[in-house]
Image (tube, rainbow, N blue to C red):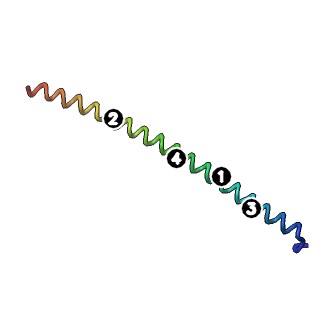
Amino acid sequence: MLHDPLLTYLSIQLRAHSARLQAAHAERDRGALSIEGAILIGILVAMAIGLGVFLNGKLNEKEGQIK
């Protein structure tokens, strides 16, 4: 029964379909990680800009006191 060509064919097709599903699932997860990375980078950039604005204000304040 294991040597039946129809069962062999169906087994191969099932394995191929399973591999495609696993690859598609892995691609979806990789995309989610990319989105999470983009959000994290966006937050870090916003924090860096905020820090730059804060330091610029403090430096301008000190410059006014020196003059």
Quadrant that contains the N terminus: bottom right
- The relative height of residue 2 versus residue 10 in the rendered view (above or below) is below
Residue 16 — which label?
Answer: 3
Name the residue that disc number 1 marks: 25
Q: Position of residue 15 (x, y in %)?
A: 76, 63
Local SS, label 3? helix
- The relative height of residue 2 versus residue 59 in the rendered view (above or below) is below
* Sequence-earlier tag: 4 or 1: 1
Name the residue that disc number 2 marks: 49
Decide: few, some or many residues near mark 4? Use Cα within 10 Å; few <14, some 14-19, many ≥20: few
Decide: few, some or many residues near mark 1? Use Cα within 10 Å; few <14, some 14-19, many ≥20: few
Left-right relation of 16 to 49: right
| Residue at x 62% of width, y 54% of height | 26
| Residue at x 68% of width, y 56% of height | 22
Name the residue that disc number 4 marks: 34
Amino acid type, mark 4: Ser
Contact between labelled residues 3 and 1, with CB atoms less than 8 Å apart: no
The span from disc 3 to disc 4 (Cα, nearest Å) is 27 Å
* Sequence-earlier tag: 3 or 4: 3
* Sequence-earlier tag: 2 or 3: 3
* Sequence-earlier tag: 1 or 3: 3
Amino acid type, mark 3: Ala
Q: Position of residue 25 (x, y in %)?
A: 65, 52
As drawn, the residue found furthest toward the bottom would be 3
Amino acid type, mark 1: His
- The relative height of residue 5 versus residue 14 in the rendered view (above or below) is below
